[in-house]
Image (cartoon, rainbow, N blue to C red):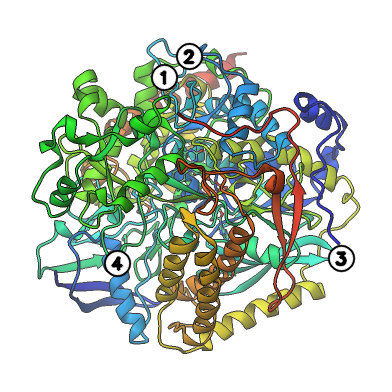
Amino acid sequence: MIFTLKIWRQKNATDKGGLVTYKIGDVSPDSSFLEMLDQLNQQLVGKGEDPVAFDHDCREGICGACGLYINGRPHGPLKGTTTCQLHMRAFRDGETIYIEPWRSEAFPIVRDLIVDRSAFDKIIQAGGYISVNSGGMPDANTIPVPKPNADSAFDAAACIGCGACVAACPNASPMLFVGAKISHLALLPQGRIEAARRVQKMVAAMDTLGFGNCSNAYACQAECPKEISVANIARMNREFLAAKMFAEKEKNVGFTL
Amino acid sequence: MIKLNANAPNAPLADQWDAYKASCKLVNPNNKRKLDIIVVGTGLAGASAAATLGQLGYNVKSFCYQDTPRRAHSIAAQGGINAAKNYQNDGDNVYRLFYDTIKGGDYRSRESNVYRLASISPEIIDICVAQGVPFAREYGGLLANRSFGGAQVSRTFYARGQTGQQLLIGAYSAMSRQIAEGRVKLYSRRDVLDIVIVDGKARGVIARNLVTGEIERHSAHAVVLATGGYGNVFYLSTNAMGSNVTPAWSAYKKGALFANPCFTQIHPTCIPVHGEFQSKLTLMSESLRNDGRIWVPKEMEDAELIRQKKLRPEQIHESKRDYYLERRYPAFGNLVPRDVASRAAKERCDAGYGVSTSGRAVYLDFSAAIERLGRSEISARYGNLFQMYQRIVDDNPYRTPMMIYPAVHYTMGGLWVDYELMTTVPGLYSIGECNFSDHGANRLGASALMQGLADGYFILPYTISGYLSSEINTPPIATTLPEFHHAAREVSDRLARLKETNGKESVDHFHRHLGKIMWEYCGMSRNEAGLTKALGLIAALKQEFASGVKIPGGLKEYNPELEKAWRVQDFIELGDLMVRDALLRKESCGGHFREEYQTPDHEALRNDDEFAFVAAWEHKGRDAAPDMHREELRFETVKPSQRSYK
Ligand SMILES: Cc1cc2nc3c(=O)[nH]c(=O)nc-3n(C[C@H](O)[C@H](O)[C@H](O)COP(=O)(O)OP(=O)(O)OC[C@H]3O[C@@H](n4cnc5c(N)ncnc54)[C@H](O)[C@@H]3O)c2cc1C
Ligand code: FES
């Protein structure tokens, strides 16, 4: 197969950047999208030019490192598929393909197609965990979890943190990411104890990191490579409201006592 | 002269760890605050260690090359994690897990470490569940288990086909909590290129900031390497693309011994190679073997027609299929250990019965299971794996059997460590896949995750305190010491030399070439002639690389080619050591099959009299041959026996 590629090139965070056109031929339809970029990079290196920088590691759809706009869509045209799992047979021979980095204020560009997603880590650091130490644990089976809850918690926990939800959202909202984490932990008895604190801290972190708010466009769910459901956003909102009310009550209790 | 001593406590096997813990030195909380520890790597081993050391009160500096710790290679593990919980009441216990692990390692691992691993395993599940890892559950709300290749009990805990991901998210969140509390400082997108040694002790690392290209110095009272395995030496493997040997290799060059480098695990259920630009092989969980039946056509002509795409596997009648594992190993059938399954697949393909266009694949067939259990049950068990297969191969495994072939998956060799997980360099520790310790010659499924977490949550935090208790009067280590200057300059010089080479070929060109040599001559089966040939080929490749590599871009910027070049240079040197190690081991054990040493029916023939030892290699300088030291293995509790899966 042959393709015309229009790729965003940008040397570093302060460089202006722009689209550069490349031609590539002899691409196997069984190549993954990233293997096609490897092939392009081999050509560029051969000519002594800088290869196109992009993030990747596992190449099996689980680490969440890869992530590009392909023809304007996060992770390209297929549903429920990461860029590394997208194969060239999904494109028409001779097609022109636009390849760009995530664009969101909270994800500054590092180089070419690589962005800085550490804002996600900061959200997790704000409270996306259960506060336990490694030691003196009760036996695991003393905490039974109803199977449907365990399954739903897993569905939410399957988020790979790639940032496609932010990239897809017209407001660059990370609510699918945060909602998934909130749901994962709120659905488990171990996670309930800190649920109110957790949701408040994570939402606060999200607000200070330069992300936008959810306006129910649902583009995040449509573009999520792991097909995480927007029901998680609803659960997060409910948890948040409950936590706020609970916090008011706690305050009142505090006053009267 | 180095004398290898594992330093296992002097107590009966089952009491050793308790005895150790009861007598090891502790560091009091006020002093912990004054001690710095560097942990390189944020996979299961590194993240669990950083979280626990932070929680204990040490100052932890954590490094990874990814943009965030949550992407470490551990995230890709699929099948599950073993623990001797006996929740299924099928007769499992610590001794049995220990026994299976020693036997599965073909009697080439250390009893004391393996026993400790088995005895800690139940606690690992407890901490993971407390952290909210969503393991699979039964309808009654209790944890579910499955059995895994090579085991006759159900002791494997799993989270669909994404166990590694869920365990890593658990460890990453525990670590994130410590980052928020200021106990752990995270340095991501750092390539650790060298270890700094001051007065004989590990005192820091030299790292390249991957974004700016800046060479950084970081110091600590102790350094822990948790940098994973080196399967990428084969170019095509199931490892993440960035997995590398560099920190372990620099430790080796600075005096740490590298043990059993040739012990590689080959995984039988991977998606076969399809084309020239392929960058990695995808593993599909071995749990598939619980319900899938493996076969190739009985008739050579049928295999030929399939390869020419003139015949579909569904059209081959039951009586014309050779379920070769069930035929050869009636007791274990499709659940034989990985090395046996892998070699049997290769044997069938070599004999001309392979089924993909390349002839390098066998079938994994679910039709019987779908008939027995129904499509929805199969999809509940393996849905995501089927989906992944379909995406890559463009074929529907509910209808057509999957094609699988063995691929390099896990490396059991690594830095030599003693019972305390310390290398031969004082203050330098190695945990997880990065060390050699617990798996011998053929790690079974679901034990690497167990080891990574045991090391990080439960072992290293104890053993490191013994060392650090004698460091409480050492002030913070200054990065202005001459040793840091020197190491930083050497790193800069080597980078500059790489950059200036100005040859003609890309880094990948050399890497691919190396991979071919390694797979061909030091892969699933090896022989003396091939290995000797490989030594020459690798030496030549090293020369070609030195003058022929071409790296565009600058030193002081994000430069992925430069990053790869350093790694491939290390891989070439490691390849040489692996071949030497394979040459020396004149026996077949586990996944390491020397063709000269086999039983009349082509099974691995071990030689316990001469080779029941760990081969630990010492670097002797750039152009000298390395020295081999032996750690004799003593089997006091389990008597080595020939493995039989018939
Ligand atoms: C596809 C697949 C499936 C598997 N399935 C299972 C399974 O079901 N059960 C099981 O028990 N095992 C399984 N394994 C094996 C298991 O996943 C690994 O052995 C284990 O995860 C290794 O963990 P680790 O923490 O030692 O290293 P890793 O997870 O590999 O982490 C290495 C860390 O070191 C860092 N690092 C490496 N080099 C550098 C450097 N130069 N500078 C800075 N940082 C560096 C990386 O950034 C990373 O954080 C599987 C492996 C694969 C490949
Ligand atoms: S590279 Fe890991 S998800 Fe794509």
Q: Chain of mark 4?
A: B
- Could you tell me which secondary element the residue under label 3 belongs to? loop
The secondary structure type at the circle numbered 4 is loop
In three-dimensional space, the C-alpha distance between marks 2 and 3, rounded to whole angstroms, equals 53 Å
Q: Can you tell which mark lies on residue B277? A: 4
Q: Which quadrant of the figure has residue B206? A: bottom right
Identify the amino acid type marked 4: Phe
Look at discs 1 and 2 and give the one toward the viewer: 1
Tag 3 near tag 4, CB within 8 Å: no
Three-letter amino acid code at the position of disc 1: Arg
Q: Tell me whether circle 1 and circle 4 mark residues in contact (CB < 8 Å).
A: no
Q: Quadrant of the N terminus of chain B?
A: bottom right
* Sequence-wise first label, 1 or 4: 1
Residue B137 circle label: 1
Where does label 3 land, which residue? B199
Please state which of residues B105 and B46 is positioned toward the viewer in this rendering: B105
Image position of B507 (left or right of B282):
right
The label nearer to you, 1 versus 4, is: 4
Q: Between marks 1 and 3, how big is the CA–CA gap?
A: 52 Å
Gap in Å between the C-alphas at discs 1 and 2?
Answer: 9 Å
Let me know if marks 2 and 3 both belong to one chain. no
Look at 46% across and 18% down and name the residue there: B143
Question: Residue B642: x and y, percent?
Answer: 58, 34
The answer to which quarter of the image holds residue A91 is bottom left
**For mark 2, what is the residue?**
A144
Q: Nearer the viewer, residue B12 or B50?
A: B12
Q: Quadrant of residue B616?
A: bottom right
